[in-house]
Image: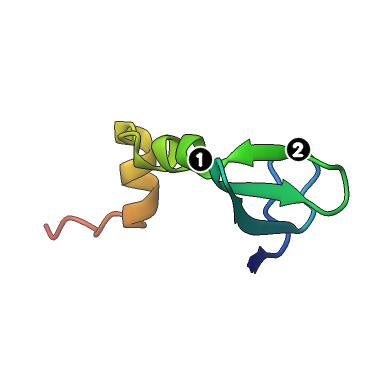
Amino acid sequence: MMWKFKSCPKCAGDLFVDSDMNGWYVECLQCGYLSDLDSMLKVKKEPVNKEEKLARAGPAKPIAK
């Protein structure tokens, strides 16, 4: 079992990652949010849009004159 603090998409509570006979899942300790881990991995692997890539790149360098 693994903990992911302040990572719940519903309430920003603490998630724990665990498995059962159906596979891996995450569950929130505070609100009870429950999700299969496979569905969360698919969301994280989706391509990011152009604006997000630029935001992650940081500020642009000034153009020398």
Q: Is residue 7 left or right of residue 49?
A: right
Q: Which residue is mark 1?
A: 40
Q: Residue furthest right?
A: 30
Residue 38 screen position, x and y as percent = 46, 40
Looking at the image, residue 45 sits to the left or right of residue 1; the answer is: left
Q: Residues within 10 Å of mark 1 (few under 14, many from 20)?
A: few
The quarter of the displayed image where residue 32 is located = top right
Q: Which quadrant is home to the N terminus?
A: bottom right
Q: Nearer the viewer, residue 33 or 64?
A: 33
Task: Count neighbours of disc 2 (C-alpha within 10 A) and say few if under 14, some if 14 to 19, many if 20 or more.
Answer: few
Count of numbered circles on the image: 2
Q: Earlier in the sequence, mark 1 or mark 2?
A: 2
Identity of the residue drawn at 17% across and 55% down = 63
Q: Are marks 1 and 2 in contact (CB under 8 Å)?
A: no
Drawn side of residue 25 relative to residue 57, left or right: right
Can you tell which of label 1 and label 2 is closer to the viewer?
1
Q: Establish if 35 lies above or below 59.
A: above
Disc 2 marks which residue? 10
Q: Is residue 55 above or below residue 64?
A: above
**What's the residue at 63%, 37% (across, down)?**
35
Q: Amino acid at mark 1?
A: Met
Residue under the point 37% across and 52% down: 56
The residue positioned farthest toward the bottom in the image shown:
2
Picture coordinates of residue 40 (x, y %)?
50, 40
Q: Residue at x 64, y 49 (%)?
A: 26
Q: Quadrant of residue 10?
A: top right
Report the Cα–Cα distance between label 1 and label 2. Answer: 13 Å
- Return the x and y of residue 49 as percentages of the image width and height: 33, 31
Quadrant the C terminus occupies: bottom left
Say which quarter of the image contains residue 31.
top right
